[in-house]
Image (cartoon, coloured by chain):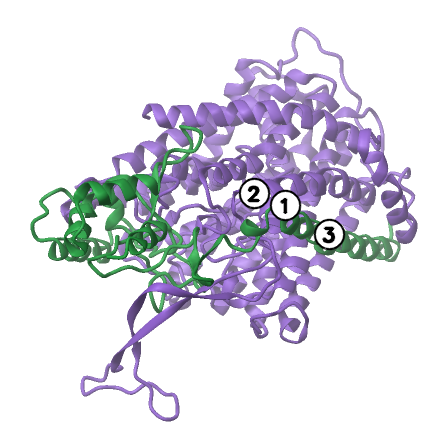
Amino acid sequence: MNTNAVMQLALYLAVLLVLAWPLSGYITRVMRGEHLGPTRLLAPVERLFYKLAGVDAGRETGWKSYAVGLVLFNLTGVVAVYALQRLQGVLPLNPQGFGTISPDSSFNTAISFVANTNWQGYAGESTMSYLTQMLGLSVQNFLSAATGIAVVIALIRGFARKSLETIGNVWADLTRVTLYVLVPLSLVVAVLLVGQGVIQNFRPYTEVQTVQATVYQTARLDAHGAPVNGADGKPLMVDTAATTQTLPMGPVASQEAIKMLGTNGGGFFNANSAHPYENPTPLSNFIEMLAIFLIPAALCFVFGRMVGDKRQGWAVLAAMTVLFVAAYGVTVWAELAGNPALQHAGAASSLNMEGKETRFGIVASSLFATITTAASCGAVNAMHDSFTPLGGMVPMALMQLGEVVFGGVGSGLYGMLVYAILAVFIAGLMVGRTPEYLGKKIESFEMKMTAIAILATPILVLAGTAIAVSVSAGQAGVLNPQAHGFSEILYAFSSAANNNGSAFAGLSANTPFYNVMLGLAMWFGRFAIIVPVLAMAGSLAGKQRLAVTAGTLPTHGPLFVVLLIGAVLLVGALNFIPGLALGPIVEHLQMIG
Amino acid sequence: MNLSSQLRPALTIFVLLTALTGVLYPAAVTGIAQGVFPNQANGSVISKDGRAVGSGLIGQNFTEPRYFWGRPSATGPMPYNGAGSGGSNLGPTNPALFDAVKTRVAALKAADPGNTAPVPVDLVTASGSGLDPDISPEAAAYQIGRIAKARNLSIPQVEALVAANTTGKQWGFLGEARVNVLKLNLALDALGK
């Protein structure tokens, strides 16, 4: 790492901690139902919601009721986003007159945004109306984030409570986190982004007269609009000159803010956060990176506060940070070392600028790529498909670890707490004691749920990849040859099942095969973890909290941090080293060889 | 627990939160944005003689020797297509990437035969968005001789314009230094040569 790379990281982590700590105090009190400061003004809105919904916010439920409510709520979201896409042609706020989206693409996108994945098979600026973006996609950015936070709060309550049957009221949790946390934060971030140049309007796309005409080739058409083939059977090409450029418009900033804060990652435009209208300056880039980790980091502190031992939150955060810094080191090293082919082709250096923006350069692009895949965000400010083999392997591996290095809002922490349970279980086996975490005995039921939660995504990734590489519909989407082509498919399933949403975007995934396969991977990758986690929350809430004795494994010190990192890496390595060897590692050897 | 008792809150809370986050929130952001930052909110459009000629944030395609060239753009069907952003997505070992870079190096050298300086890498690699408005200061410096010759300007004249359109790292350390190609070319045209 050079000095610039170290400085940008150090500043990032420092500002992140300074912001996350106070936010954690705020979130803790909001989730208890307290109203503080100016949020009192919103309290009547909250009460009105409960009244209209017939909800008694003070009445908590057990885990089953909580889970059923949450799944129903999310299914409603799938239906709404699907319907909006199918009907957008006849709905308002569609100045470009985009038509209806195909059923398989609508299915994929609906699940994608509900499951906090935001995988995108479509190109936003040429397919989605403002109404669909705003009322469908942007709304799910909020609601999927609220879902993740609600689940982790329920799990933390399970640890914090003694001998209780309930884990919370799902409707109160969803309403409070959206109303008091996500909306105000998004408002602030959105306005900051507009100040840097992110657009926010409802105008039709603007045509401008370019300084120089652009000559490009298009297929020659006959009188009926069909392409004309030449003697060699290929379409005849003619020179066409464009003297105008289309500037896309839309309500971008409002979506951009929650896209980051909610670790969603679905871009308004096809190029996502590489697009100058989504991410115009190095400062907007810094704000977006902060917004990605802000809530996941704060939730670690919320955890410490709610279980009554702040050191527990610090320990989890420390484990995440160590993994994150190591991953960043590899990415930035690989991208700076670059691609020897560029130099062989005549460029002055091998710095890997393919797919990267000048204003971000190598360092800010590598940092962004590490953050967006450590968290389950999936926004990109550079094209991961064009990263060096090892520079692209790190984002892939971070997803395959289960998105627990900060991870998605809520989902990262509940994922990491599942690993914490696995870690104390392994430690318990080694010393021959019943494992406990935070005074709760970890027994057979908890371990079954842990096993389901940890194994669900590797099964989806490995089985999905295996099927896709074996059938022609799967092979057809690949852009790059050889090992890199395999990496494109492995990346796609790693991204979908772990709800990240970034892509090796050379893969043409907007086909019925990939839309359905990846749609299923996203749905089960989300809810095959949420349901067992809620079940565990219910079971834990019902247990006594045991007193700390001399034989208790302390879970707030460096030893536990190492143990936790070890558990995460062990499971990840066992599942994915063979796959990574076939893709990025082979390609790296080819590149330097 | 029963399913039907959960249905009413699920639907009602969904509709209410949709109204809050999908209608009120974007409306509020739009109101503030249009009130406080109207220029940015509407695309940072640059006008010349009362006519919109581009955006300060969106790059344009330049191929004539008398203009500074920007990053290669992989958008289709034409480069710098504002209605279809995206990168090449070519992998590092893809022969197509090697060939593309080689062709671009040759084009730069053909446009400026006397120039023996090494070709900056950002000038021959496609950007992520296909709409990158900037090049590195090195990429601008590489082209100064060509521009000066094509426009009958002195090297210091062109250098001064490049310097005027160069932005340093933000706050001295964020991101990278860069030169806005469209603004620079508009400044060249404004010289009247």
A178 up-or-down from A235: above or below: above
Q: Disc 3 to disc 2, how far (Cα)?
A: 38 Å
Q: Mark 1 points at which residue?
A: B36
- Which type of secondary structure does the marked residue at label 2 adopt? helix
Which image quadrant: the N terminus of chain A?
A: top left
Pinpoint the chain carrying mark 3. Answer: A
Chain letter for the green part? B
- Dot 1 and dot 2 residues touching (CB under 8 Å): yes
- Amino acid under label 1? Val
Pinpoint the chain carrying mark 2. Answer: A
Query: Of the numbered discs in the image, which one, if any, rests on residue A71?
Result: 3
Q: How crowded is mark 3: few (under 14 residues within 10 Å), some or many (20 or more)?
A: some
- At 26% across and 86% down in the image, what residue appears? A229
- Which type of secondary structure does the marked residue at label 1 adopt? helix
User: Is B189 or B80 nearer to us in this picture?
Assistant: B189
Residue A217, image quadrant: bottom left
Q: Chain A is drawn in which colour?
A: purple
First reached walking from the N terminus: tag 3 or tag 2: 3
Q: Which residue in the rendered view is the most extreme toward the top?
A: A550
The reply to whether residue A442 is in sight is no
- Amino acid under label 2? Gly
Q: Residues within 10 Å of mark 2 (few under 14, many from 20)?
A: some
A419 up-or-down from A245: above or below: above
Q: Which residue in the rendered view is the most extreme toward the front?
A: B192
